[in-house]
Image (cartoon, coloured by chain):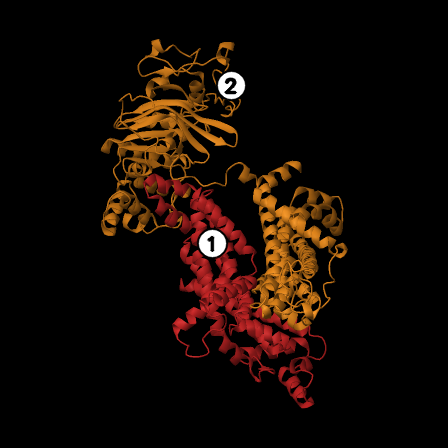
Chain colours: A red, B orange
Amino acid sequence: MGGYILKRLLSAIPVLLGITVIVFLIMAMIPGDPATAILGSYATPENIERLNRHLGLDEPLWRQYFIWLGNLLQGDFGRSFALNRPVLDEILDRFGATLILAGTAFVMCSLLGILAGVIAAAQQYGLADKIITFVVIIGISIPSFFLGMMMILLFSVQLRWLPASGMYSMFGGGDLPDLIRHLIMPAIALSVVATGVIARLSRSAMLEVLRQDFIRTARAKGVHERRVVWRHALRAAMVSIIPVLGIQAGFVISGAVYIEIVFQWPGIGRMLVDAILKRDILLVQGGVVFVAACYVMFNIVVDVAQSLLDPRIKT
Amino acid sequence: MRAFLKLLFRNRLAGVGAVVLTIIVLLALLTPILPLHPPNETNTANRFLRPLAEGHLLGTDHLGRDLLSRLLWGTRLSLAVGFAAAVIAAVIGAAIGIIAGYAGGRTDNVTMRGVDMLMAFPYILLALAIVAVLGPGLMNALIAVAVVNIPFFARNIRGITVGIAHKEFVDAARLAGMGHLRILTTEVLPNVVPVIVIAMSTTVGWMILETAGLSFLGLGSQPPRADLGSMLGEARSAMITAPHTSLVPGAMILLIVMSITLLGDGVRDALDPRLKSGALSRPLPATVVERDHVPATRGAGLLDIQNLETQFQVGKRVYRAVNDVSLTLEPGECLGIIGESGSGKSVTALSVMGLVASPPGVITGGAVRYRGDDLIGAKYERLRSLRGDRIAYIFQDPLATLHPLYRVGDQLAEAIRSHHAVSQREARRRAIALLKDVRIPNAENRLRSYPHELSGGMRQRVGIAMALANEPDIIIADEPTTALDVTVQAQILALLDDLRRERGLAILFITHDFGVVGQLCDRVAVMYAGRMVEEGPTEAVLRAPAHPYTARLIACVPELGEGRREMAAIPGLPPAVDDLPPGCAFAPRCDKATDACRSGEIVLEGRGARKVRCIHPEQSLEKTA
């Protein structure tokens, strides 16, 4: 097992390098003088000169990349000119908020999606299946940012049940119950699409598995139908569900950008959008590399989970 | 094409999607000639008019602009941008995929690595990076969304192309001296285009949503021009005071994406042949029973199958897989059921415990009595308590029939614990004993093996151990040795025979091999096209088969030391059981058939233990009995 994890970690290195190359190349396409683009049009000539030297912007492209990569590896993501602080500090300050939001949404969509998919498959063409299929179609079609707005209208403005924005109350909040009250709506709005996708996939994976011979064997053994569905079939279906969970995690991260804007959640997504609107190039670059790297690491966890589930994967 | 459309519209939701989408697209196309206010005409005196206000059907926004007009123009823009992004992504992605797939080798490898890298990004990060570089704007958002979706197309199309690049017609074109470019455009591309179109139709909804999203964030279309996303973004600040300005564009995005999704699902289903054949449905816990009457009990045997009828109902077609089959099994007896594939022997065996996959299987008549109790139509809980406890099954291919992800020890223990409340420890102890009973060496260690770690023979021994777990009265073995090689087959048969003698098990043994029947079975029943054609003691049937079909089956068995005996394959094929000829089903393949064989019902009749369904039997039963 340890060997497999190590192997997967090593195989992530080229992917991580590839990510830095892609981000670097995209950023290198900035029209005009990069130092001016980074510092804004009001920058002094001295500052531009200093930045050129620090990032090697007058060197050939490939050397620029290695200078940048070297800095990254030392934890130097550059300085945000709009916020006037190191990019990495800003990212780390906001990472926790995004992790809480996206993590909660991911757990919710995984559990709910699989649950709905299994129930729908077990009752194929029955009432529960029809209801779930219908709700899922709406769920995967509704833009999460629109859903978020409608939830605010209903639950914050009309019913006054939940706070409309932020992560903690301005006054007298800051504890866990306060966080949860702020988290409920954005987490639900963020998880809806992924829940739908996972439910659809779980349903078809379960239908596929329920036709297999080993399900007939379990029934012939006298295993109770509940156990046939939730143990025998689900376990086998998980083999095709888990990779999709990995992909959906990417969609949850993507959706978090919208949800953080709608609910003014102080996370990385909102930081990125603000940075783009302010043309804060280094902050965008650093944020993108950081989140992409986290996603790659998360997918390693997914692969390890898959190998724990399926003994046929050679470890 | 018409059949396809018919299929599509039979799916009502897909029909709704198609209609809604058509209306939206038509409205978007007609927008410039509709009598609407100009979308950007501001009138601050009329800010935030509610829907149904005079002259403004959907009301106005924060600048007093007509919402209906803006909605239609915005829809037009969103559809155009989403569609354009889909086309760009499809063309570039497909080009990359075709070249990589056709070139193969290094080119393929390097390209696909690059594609994998792009796919390692959550899509919005890439889109945001691109917009950050190019600056906010609708065109740039379009480029970002297109680029982000290129890897998806490249990967799909490459897969298809690799398949095509190795087809004969491509080789032929190459031998004919055609250049690569010509081969790509004339041979490969036409085969790939349908896949591209399907992939596009499934992603265009997404791309509309993604561009709307970027516009919503303020990174896409810039004022005063608005697509649906930026309309929603602008309306957000007035969400509380004038919610209709948010609702209108949001609901439109929902409608567009939903109708595309519904239509896409419908197209996919209509193209999938499996759905039509019912092969996509999951089997119920027990076979459906639809019978009008229950035959009176004969009070015979440990297991008494009376006039059993099982059908497969697929659409309007009815396959009569088991047609009026009656059999009895005495305690300690081994009864063989023999026939070709499709003769209904396995379906007969599975019907006993309601294990015929349903849908499409339905038991339409007869009874199966275990110790006098009818099992057909018994409550699920009653069936479950008998399954594996009193009547156990052994199936054909033990790799497919054991759960691949559970250790064999756990699967054995589960068989016991499904019927007896024993501790994990006790179940484990019994599991070891069972593995020893089926002569598996090193049983303690084997408990921890997964099925794929065992050989075929070992797996089947596990399957037998599982059947023995609760010391059943009856074992139904459905071709248990068919997937095994000959030496292993002999061992398994010997084991079954030993177990039967040691424990007084009754065995119902399904096979297509008379050699196997001869080794194991006391009596044999021969099935053809869902009906029994002959029954009798094995010895007698083997020595003097009465039905011509039985005689031909026996002639198929090679015997050692018999020299150059002629192996007589049976000419022709068994009839389809949804279209049975009147009279004897074997008549078309039989040399003795006369007109009488092809008309009217021929009954199964005989004396004592021997019965035959034939007008011209090979031998008279009087002589052999």
In the displayed structure image, the side of residue B177 where residue B451 appears, left or right? left
- Check chain identity for marks 1 and 2: say if they share one: no
In the displayed structure image, the side of residue B106 where residue A153 appears, left or right? left
Chain ID for label 2?
A: B
Q: Nearer the viewer, residue B483 or B396?
A: B396
Crowd tier of the residue under label 2, counting other residues whose Cα lies within 10 Å: few below 14, some 14–19, many 20 or above: some
Instruction: Give residue B560's mark.
Output: none
Q: For mark 1, give the secondary structure.
A: helix
**Residue at the spot of label 1:** A241
Q: Nearer the viewer, residue B108 or A95?
A: A95
How far apart in space, not on screen, are marks 1 and 2 (Cα)?
47 Å
Q: Position of residue A262 (x, y in %)?
A: 55, 68
Q: Position of residue B201 (x, y in %)?
A: 64, 51
In the displayed structure image, the side of residue B618 where residue A270 appears, left or right? right
Q: Position of residue A273 (x, y in %)?
A: 59, 72
**Residue at the spot of label 2:** B581
Q: Where, by quadrant of the figure, is residue B485 drawn? A: top left
Quadrant placement of the N terminus of chain B: top right
Outermost residue, front direction? B54
Please say whether residue A58 is visible from this viewpoint: no
Outermost residue, bottom direction? A46
Please say whether residue A286 is visible from this viewpoint: yes
Quadrant placement of the C terminus of chain B: top left
Crowd tier of the residue under label 1, counting other residues whose Cα lies within 10 Å: few below 14, some 14–19, many 20 or above: many
Q: Which amino acid is tagged 2? A: Pro
Q: Which amino acid is tagged 1? A: Ile
A77 relative to B2, above or below: below
Q: Where, by quadrant of the figure, is residue A176 drawn? A: bottom left
Do residues under tags 1 and 2 come within 8 Å of each other at their CB atoms?
no
